[in-house]
Image: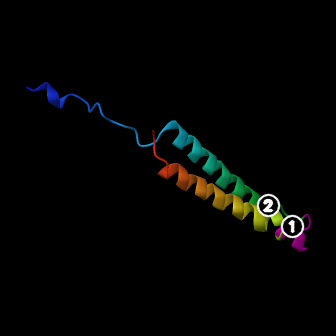
């Protein structure tokens, strides 16, 4: 029997480095935070509609921007070359 079949490839290079995984985690946290901010609060009285709570700047502007930035960070982390 030949021993070459039992040897592992020595030129194995991992697909992602630690930096890629850190960037992916940061992007995931940004997306989760954006989703949390978009969920927002609630009205004190369920029988009344408060325009300022439902359509606040945090829900309409900040949260979607944070989600898109998180997606951009995720894409960058995936395509970033390892050294």
Instruction: Tell me residue 58's x, y (percent).
Output: 81, 62
Is 63 situated left or right of 83 in this image?
right
Q: Residues within 10 Å of mark 1 (few under 14, many from 20)?
A: some
Main secondary structure found in the magenta portion: loop
Q: Is residue 26 above or below residue 9?
A: below
CB under 8 Å between discs 2 and 1: yes
Q: Residue at x 30, y 34 (%)?
A: 11
Q: Is residue 51 above or below residue 23?
A: below
Q: Which residues are magenta?
A: 44-54
Q: Residue at x 87, y 67 (%)?
A: 53
52 falls in the magenta region:
yes
Instruction: Tell me residue 83's x, y (percent).
Output: 45, 38
Question: Element type at marker 1?
Answer: helix
Label 1 sits on residue = 53
**The image quarter in which residue 12 lies:** top left
Q: Residue at x 65, y 55 (%)?
A: 31
Q: Is residue 45 above or below residue 23?
A: below
Looking at the rendered image, the quarter that the N terminus falls into is: top left
Is 20 situated left or right of 54 in this image?
left
Q: Residue at x 26, y 30 (%)?
A: 8
Is 21 situated left or right of 66 in this image?
left
Label 2 sits on residue = 40
**The image quarter in which residue 59 lies:** bottom right
Instruction: Tell me residue 37's x, y (percent).
Output: 76, 58
Instruction: Tell me residue 7's x, y (percent).
Output: 22, 28
């Amino acid at each position: 029997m030949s021993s070459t079949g039992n040897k592992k490839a020595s030129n194995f290079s991992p697909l992602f480095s630690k930096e890629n995984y850190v960037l992916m985690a940061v992007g995931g946290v940004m997306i989760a935070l954006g989703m949390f901010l978009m969920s927002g609060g609630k009205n004190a009285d369920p029988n009344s509609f408060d325009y300022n709570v439902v359509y606040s700047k945090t829900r309409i502007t900040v949260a979607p921007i944070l989600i898109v930035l998180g997606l951009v960070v995720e894409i960058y982390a995936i395509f970033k070359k390892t050294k």
